[in-house]
Image (cartoon, rainbow, N blue to C red):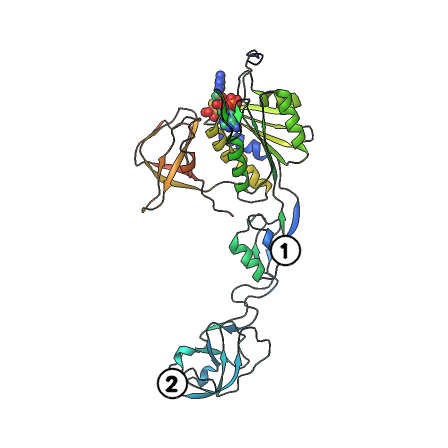
Amino acid sequence: MPDAAPHAAVPPRPVRTLDEHAAAVLALAGPTPVQAVPLADALGLALATDVASTVDLPPWDNSAMDGYALRATDLVAGAVLDVADDVPAGDTRSVHVPAGAAVRIMTGAPLPAGADTVLPVERTDGGTGRVRVDDVVAAGAHVRRRGEDVRAGQVLLRAGDVLGAGALGLLAATGHARVDVHRRPRVAVVSTGSELVAAGQPLAHGQIHESNGVQLAAAARAAGAEVVDVVVVPDDVRAVQDALAALAARADLVVTTGGVSVGAYDVVRDALTAVGAAELVHVRVQPGRPQATGRLADGTPVVALPGNPVSAFVSFEVFVRPLVRHMLGASRTRRRTLRARLVGEVRSPQGRRQLLRGALDLSGPEPRVAAVGGPGSHLLGALATADALIDLPEPVTHVTPGQTVTVIDLREHDA
Ligand SMILES: Nc1nc2c(c(=O)[nH]1)N[C@H]1C(S)=C(S)[C@@H](COP(=O)(O)OP(=O)(O)OC[C@H]3O[C@@H](n4cnc5c(N)ncnc54)[C@H](O)[C@@H]3O)O[C@H]1N2
Ligand code: MOO
């Protein structure tokens, strides 16, 4: 048995609302440095500057159909026209359509000078030397005009926009090979607890498999971070201090779990307090009541989350994820919310905001959500099925079936 640490007198902690603590965490760090990266490396990163098009799109008038480019005045049902030339996509010649003739053209090829209309091949006999007009189209039909989509100089994306597949395609189409983005925030995850044993190892009585580190490293990556280290440290203040000091040089942000409560072995509390720049608070939220923030000697911010796995999961979502998004340079740091009808009933403690794990059902005419896993912050069993948090305001104590609740949507929307 370890030398028993005495229960120290418990100093009262400042009490905050969820929004107050989220604001305090968000203020710990700003966006990371900017770097120019090739488009292929930019998925999921946030733009550091507004980006404008370098070209008109389309860059020149071109055909929307495979067919024949001609003058609308020559379009008469039954007419037979000479086919003066053949313009496939990628043809860089300047081609001209003489009056009374047609030029065979493929989708995306430049419209020949003189032509104003494209007659789709289906409305002809498909001839190559001469072509018969079986059916007419309106003047100007099937021509895609220069600049009708995007103008050169037009701002396409704003600083803070997160680049998904569509944005990357647009950047490539408008002449950009590289973009200025914020680099991924470097996050280190520290799990504390002498009871923790790595997944896959046998357990002695009193030991459990470490899961917060695995879970939060994945959540940090999903939020856009580069996870530089995941370490497990026993309940020893010195060991925690050494681990934090070693990570300071490599990480922009350190996230810890465990040891922030009032117990005799709550070592993160003591390690952060020893560094000096720590705030230990109680947040009026369930789960996630004990929370701390701090700075290491070199200024690296630390966000300390409670050890209960559900508390760590929910606390990461509402406190750490917005900070990671902010460091990434994203202008939208919060998850989307929606209103959904509650399936079943739930209860919530008076005076504490409650974030219940929920399963969303979007298959019907209106969104529905059911609480999963129970309110206990040790109840991991349903963590994998939760794709939402049911957000119950502080005064709410009881919600009956069919009532509408606010739901934080945990499904990934950004790349
Ligand atoms: N006397 C009081 N006791 C507790 C209070 C309180 O106000 N007064 N608050 C409770 C609440 S609420 C929470 S939440 C927890 C938070 O405590 P800690 O942050 O100090 O967490 P630990 O005690 O280290 O661990 C709690 C629980 O979670 C398990 N755990 C911890 N780390 C991991 C990990 N990496 N992987 C898996 N499981 C982990 C740990 O074994 C404990 O079961 O304090 C309450 N107590
Ligand atoms: O506040 Mo604790 O996080 O309920 O288990």
| Viewer-proximal residue among 219 and 48 | 219
Left or right placement of residue 123 versus residue 221 in this view: left
| Residue 389 percent across, percent down from the top left | 42, 35
* Res. 289 visible in picture: no
Q: Is residue 136 above or below residue 161?
A: below
Work out which quarter of the rendered image holds the N terminus and state it.
Answer: top right
Mark 1 CB lies closer than 8 A to ligand 1: no
Q: Tell me which numbered mark, 2 or 1, is placed earlier along the sequence.
A: 2
Left or right placement of residue 24 versus residue 250 in this view: left
| Viewer-proximal residue among 245 and 161 | 245
Q: Residues within 10 Å of mark 2 (few under 14, many from 20)?
A: some
| Residue 338 percent across, percent down from the top left | 41, 42
Q: Is residue 275 above or below residue 253?
A: above
Mark 2 CB lies closer than 8 A to ligand 2: no
Task: Please name which of the two marks, 2 or 1, marks the residue nearer to the observer.
Answer: 1
Residue ID for mark 2: 77
Q: Amino acid at mark 1?
A: Arg
Q: Residues within 10 Å of mark 1 (few under 14, many from 20)?
A: some
Residue at the (43%, 34%) spot, across then down: 383
| Residue 264 percent across, percent down from the top left | 55, 15
Q: Secondary structure at mark 2?
A: loop
Q: Amino acid at mark 2?
A: Ala
Q: Secondary structure at mark 1?
A: strand
Q: Residue furthest front?
A: 202
* Res. 347 visible in picture: yes
Could you say which quadrant of the image residue 9 lies in? Answer: top right
Could you say which quadrant of the image residue 138 lies in? Answer: bottom left
Real-space Cα distance between discs 2 and 1? 51 Å
Are discs 2 and 1 less than 8 Å apart at CB? Answer: no
Residue ID for mark 1: 178
